Image (cartoon, rainbow, N blue to C red):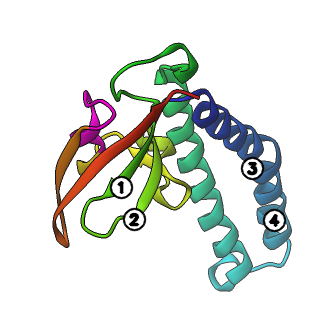
Amino acid sequence: MTRAGFTALDDELKLLKSVERPAVIRAIAEAREHGDLSENAEYHAAREKQSFIEGRIKELEALVSLAEVIDPTKLSGAVKFGATVTVVDEDSDEEKTYQIVGEAEADIERGLLNIRSPLARALIGKDEGDSVEVKTPGGQKSYEILSIRYI
């Protein structure tokens, strides 16, 4: 994963442990004071939120502990993990820029492309000027690689 992706996950983990977990524990304690737990919606909602938070903490701890952080600025050459790639759709001439990142940090809306996606797999190992064919849900797409940067 990239340094930015690792930092974002680590920050979320710290927030959950230091802010969210204590807040939900307080909410459960307050709800218990209201009496009968079987009909206490606040209590059940707080317990459900606690379950979600604890699950997410476990998930983040596993991701952070197993993460291999890669610094893209030390890389160069053909497309590989961490590359920021600008491609043009050969049919529509629409340009898009993506950074190839790990699964945990992928967010297509922000241009962070999962390394396991069909487009990323097609781009890996290619150079500027190369064309790639990608099978998408909407049919076959052709892209030309305009630039590869490691930032």
What residue is shown at x 59% (from left), y 29% (from top)? 151
Q: Is residue 91 or residue 121 the one in the foreground?
A: 91
Residue position marked by numbered label 4 in the rendering: 27
Vertical relation: 74 (above or below) 60: above
Q: CA distance from mark 3 to mark 1?
A: 45 Å
Amino acid of disc 4: Ala
Q: Are marks 3 and 1 in contact (CB under 8 Å)?
A: no
Image spot of residue 5 (x, y percent): 58, 36
Amino acid of disc 3: Arg
Disc with the residue nearer the chain's start (2 vs 1): 1
Secondary-structure class at tag 2: loop
In reply to whether residue 128 is colored magenta, the answer given is: yes
Q: Residues within 10 Å of mark 1 (few under 14, many from 20)?
A: some
Residue position marked by numbered label 1 in the rendering: 88
Residue 94: image tag: 2
Vertical relation: 23 (above or below) 126: below
In reply to whether residue 103 is colored magenta, the answer given is: no
**Marks 1 and 4: which is nearer the front?**
1
Q: CA distance from mark 2 to mark 1?
A: 5 Å
**Marks 2 and 3: which is nearer the front?**
2
Amino acid of disc 2: Glu
